[in-house]
Image (spheres, rainbow, N blue to C red):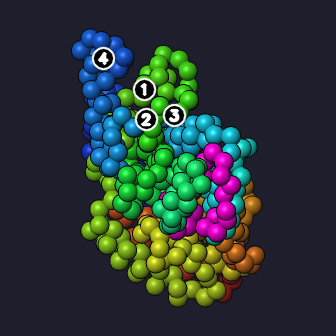
Amino acid sequence: MIYLDNAATTRITEPVLQSMLPFLTEQYGNPSALYGLGRNAKKAIEHAKEQVAKAIDAEPSQIFFTSGATESNNWVISNYDKVVSSEMEHHSISNIPVVVCLNINKMFKFKIRNTPGLVTVMLANNETGNIFDVKTLIQKAHKYGMDFHCDATAAFGKMPIDVKELDVDSLTFSGHKIHAPKGVSALYLKDPSKFRPMLYGGNQQNRLRSGTENVASIVGLGTACELHNYNPETDKLNRQKRDKFVSAIKTIPDMIINTDLENSIATTINISFKGIEGESLMLLLSQEGICVSAGSACNSGSLEPSRVLQTMGVPEDYIYGTIRVSFSNETTGEQLLTAAKAIKRNVDRIRGVSNV
Ligand code: PMP
């Protein structure tokens, strides 16, 4: 199998799994319990908080664990009455009724009225990999007295993230995109005392997010933050692999690369082929053991063209023929070239230009 859907989810790596196993077996204590077994679990959570904090230049007291970036995004937004966002956001933001979505380019120009509220824009887009100039928007939001939330789910590990340098008010990312388990995410809150709780109950996590902590997954997330955070050398290798893949793909006629190769994370490439259906291409590739996404996995079940690509102005005769290829540090250049050849062969086949 050649797995090229790492923007949808990733494999748990061996060291991440090994760090988790004790907390699924003998170290099963409740972190709120005061005897040794409980204290071990509590210590493991505190260590994971340190690992997460270090990865984004935060303090451990500013880190909270939730059930996923969906919950983290919902938590932050539930604290505001007025929320302005971009049309590029993930549905865990854009589907929240209070959120007003604007064109990302207009966000750099429009004048925000001087009212308290929240602006939320992602660091990198999960469908295209494109990076947004969030820092400029943060400065602008603060100038108008608004807070700024950043969904860094697609960005974490693929670009450096420094919450102090960004001066962001809250930021989240998700375990299962960085080789840790599904159902766990880290949320950074610059000033936790300003936030109402997400869940009420046994007062865990400083009374802000009740519920017995998912210790093993939190430990896995901490390990992933340490081992799979951004590394410039790995990034350089990934860009070399990507460029070779893109050169091979460019030999296919009538295609558009929707990823801005000059300003994107290295591992996500979004491509549209004229006159075909992305779903058909995805299924043919799947028969050859190659996993890609026809758009975004979060939109599965819907054959509507991607809102993100529509906003970007991808032409109608291309937009339905879109696939997203997202690799990881584990993917080899050879696997990417095998996939490029298979994509070419199957695009030709769907277009009826070969007898394969
Ligand atoms: N934001 C982005 C950009 C995402 O890609 C995703 C997952 N597809 C989420 C939020 C939601 O994350 P989770 O699956 O952890 O709820």
Marks 4 and 2, the one that precedes in the sequence: 4
Q: Amino acid at mark 3?
A: Lys
For the residues carrying marks 1 and 4, which lies nearer the camera in this image?
1
Determine which residue is flagged by label 4. 38
Q: Are marks 2 and 1 in contact (CB under 8 Å)?
A: yes
Percent x, y of residue 265: 44, 67
Determine which residue is flagged by label 2. 64
- What residue appears at the point 57 percent right and 43 percent down from the top-left corner? 73
Marks 1 and 4, the one that precedes in the sequence: 4
Marks 3 and 1, the one that precedes in the sequence: 3
Q: In 3D space, how far apart are the residues under numbered discs 3 and 1 (Cα atoms)?
A: 15 Å
Does residue 94 appear in the picture of this structure? no
Q: Amino acid at mark 2?
A: Phe
Percent x, y of residue 255: 61, 82
Determine which residue is flagged by label 1. 205
Q: Neighbour class for label 2 at 10 Å: few (<14), some, many (≥20)?
A: many
Determine which residue is flagged by label 3. 194
Q: Which residues are magenta?
A: 107-130
Where, quadrant-wise, is the C terminus in this rendering?
bottom right
Q: Quadrant of residue 205?
A: top left
